[in-house]
C-alpha cells in the first residue's frame, strides 16, 4: 500500500510534480553532457569522434528509412570557437556518382534508386573509449538547446530508440523528445506554422511532435497501432519561432513521460504498459523528407520518379545536450530519528521514509529545499518542525521493474 502523511501550513508538499526537474534536487545526477566547447575534436576513420563521445552515423546505416539523405560525419561539424555543433544538410547533384565515406561495416553504397539527393549530419551518443557499443540510457531527463532549420524537407529530431537482440523478447521502442517536419500534422493543431512556399502541398504547416513508439512484436513498426502519446501542442504564432534558440526536453520515468518546451510542460503520458522500459540510444539528426522533392509524372499522370525541389544548404545548430538520471535505492527503508540523520540523508529513490524523532525535533530551516522520492510511503510520526520559507517536496516515484 502506498501511503502518505501530509502536513499543512509552512511546507510545500507535492506529489508527482510536473514542473521541469529541479537541479537542486540531489536525487538527480548528471550522467552525460556535451556543451561542444572542447577543442581538437574531429571524426576518426571509424566514424567516432576523437573523444569517443559521438558516432557520426546511425547504427542502422547512413540513410534513414524513407529519407532522401546520406549521413556523413563531415556534415556534423564541431565548432568549439562558437561552442556549438552544426548538423548541415546540403543538396548534391552528383551524389550517386560520389565515392563518399561509409562506415567500415557497410560495404555497398546505397543504390541511386534510393532517391538520395542530399548529404546531412547525425550524432549518436557512444560509450567513452568503446568502439562497438552504444551508450544506452534507461529512464532520465534529456535536454537539448538548439536552433532548427526552416527549409522545406527539413526533418530534425532529438530522440531515443532501441531494439532488443534477444529473440525471446523482441521489441522496438522509441521516445521522440521532439520531431520537426513539414510532413506531419493538421494545420489547426501545430506548434508553429509558416507561410507554405510549396503550393502543391496546401495547408500542411511545419509542425512539431512528441511521441512514444512501443512495438511488442519486434517486427516492422506499424504507426497505426504502435504509436502512443503523440501530440502536437499548439504555440501561438509569433511565440515559438523554431528558427531561434529553444530548449526541448523530456522526463522519462517508469510511470510517466513529460515533455517540455523552454521549461514549460507541453505534453504528458501515463500508460505504463506502453512506456518504454529498456535501455535506449540517444541521438539527434537532420534528415530530409519528401517535402524537399517533387514527383515526376508520365503522360498518364502516373508518378515515375522524383527530382529535387530544394537545392540549398541549411543547418541545425546545437548548443548543448544534457542527460540527468535518478539515483535508485528502491529496496531501502529509511528511518530519520534525529537532526543528524536528516543532514546526512542519502538522496536517492527509497522504498519508504519515516521521520520518527527520538531525540528532539527534526527541523527544516527557512532556507532548506529538500526533495524525498519514495516508491511506497512517507510517514511523519515524531516531532517535526518546518520553518517558514522552507520547501519540502515529496514525490511518489515508481521504480524500474
Image: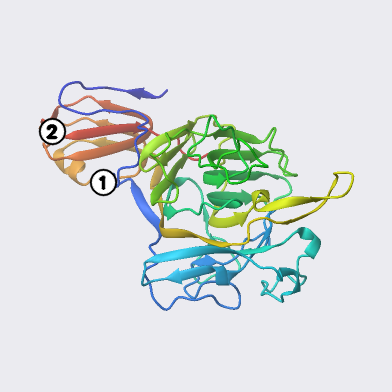
* Residue 308 image-quadrant placement: bottom right
Q: Which residue is found at the position 59% from the left and 44% from the top?
A: 182
The image shows residue 64 at horizontal and vertical percentages of 67, 56
CA separation, marks 1 and 2? 16 Å
Q: What residue is shown with label 1? A: 24
Residue 236 shows which numbered tag? none
**Among numbered discs 1 and 2, the one appearing first in the sequence:** 1
Quadrant that contains the N terminus: top left
Asked if residue 365 is positioned above or below residue 95 in the image, the reply reads above
Residue at figure coordinates x 72%, y 44% from the top left: 218
Q: Is residue 392 visible?
A: yes
Q: In this picture, is 350 found above or below 292?
A: above
Q: Quadrant of residue 372?
A: top left
| Figure disc tally | 2
Q: Position of residue 378 (x, y in %)?
A: 31, 29
Residue located 36% across and 23% down the image: 3
Can you tell which quarter of the image residue 121 is in? bottom right
Amino acid at each position: 500500500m502506498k501511503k502518505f502523511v501530509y502536513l499543512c501550513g509552512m511546507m510545500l508538499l507535492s506529489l508527482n510534480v510536473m514542473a521541469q526537474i529541479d537541479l537542486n534536487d540531489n536525487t538527480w545526477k548528471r550522467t552525460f553532457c556535451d556543451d561542444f566547447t572542447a577543442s581538437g575534436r574531429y571524426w576518426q576513420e571509424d566514424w567516432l569522434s576523437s573523444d569517443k563521445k559521438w558516432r557520426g552515423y546511425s547504427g542502422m546505416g547512413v540513410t534513414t528509412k524513407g529519407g532522401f539523405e546520406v549521413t556523413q560525419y563531415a556534415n556534423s561539424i564541431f565548432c568549439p570557437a562558437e561552442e556549438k555543433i552544426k548538423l548541415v544538410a546540403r543538396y548534391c547533384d552528383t551524389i550517386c556518382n560520389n565515392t563518399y565515406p561509409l562506415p567500415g561495416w557497410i560495404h555497398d553504397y546505397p543504390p541511386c534508386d534510393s532517391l538520395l539527393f542530399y548529404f546531412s549530419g547525425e550524432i549518436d551518443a557512444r560509450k567513452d573509449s568503446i568502439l562497438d557499443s552504444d551508450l544506452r540510457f534507461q529512464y532520465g531527463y534529456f535536454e537539448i538547446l538548439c536552433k532548427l532549420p526552416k527549409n522545406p524537407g527539413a526533418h530534425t529530431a532529438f530522440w531515443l530508440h532501441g531494439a532488443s537482440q534477444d529473440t525471446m523478447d523482441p521489441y522496438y521502442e522509441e521516445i521522440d523528445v521532439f520531431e520537426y517536419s513539414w510532413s506531419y500534422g493538421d494545420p489547426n493543431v501545430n506548434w508553429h506554422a509558416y507561410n507554405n512556399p510549396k503550393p502543391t502541398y496546401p495547408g500542411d504547416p511545419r509542425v512539431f511532435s512528441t511521441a512514444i513508439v512501443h512495438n511488442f512484436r519486434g517486427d516492422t513498426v506499424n504507426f497505426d497501432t504502435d504509436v502512443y502519446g503523440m501530440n502536437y501542442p499548439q504555440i501561438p504564432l509569433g511565440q515559438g519561432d523554431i528558427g531561434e534558440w529553444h530548449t526541448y526536453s523530456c522526463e522519462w520515468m517508469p510511470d510517466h513521460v513529460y515533455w517540455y518546451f523552454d521549461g514549460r510542460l507541453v505534453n504528458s503520458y501515463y500508460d505504463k504498459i506502453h512506456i518504454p522500459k529498456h535501455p535506449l540510444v540517444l541521438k539527434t539528426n537532420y534528415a530530409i523528407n519528401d517535402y524537399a522533392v517533387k514527383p515526376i509524372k508520365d503522360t498518364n499522370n502516373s508518378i515515375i520518379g522524383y527530382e529535387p525541389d530544394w537545392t540549398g544548404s541549411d543547418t541545425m545548430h546545437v548548443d548543448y545536450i544534457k542527460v540527468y538520471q535518478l539515483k535508485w535505492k528502491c529496496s531501502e527503508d529509511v528511518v530519520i530519528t534525529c537532526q543528524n540523520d536528516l543532514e546526512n540523508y542519502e538522496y536517492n529513490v527509497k522504498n519508504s521514509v519515516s521521520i520518527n524523532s527520538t531525540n528532539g525535533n527534526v527541523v527544516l530551516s527557512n532556507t532548506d529545499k529538500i526533495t524525498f522520492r519514495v516508491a511506497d510511503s512517507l510517514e511523519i510520526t515524531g516531532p517535526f518542525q518546518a520553518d517558514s520559507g522552507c520547501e519540502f517536496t515529496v514525490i511518489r516515484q515508481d521504480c524500474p521493474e
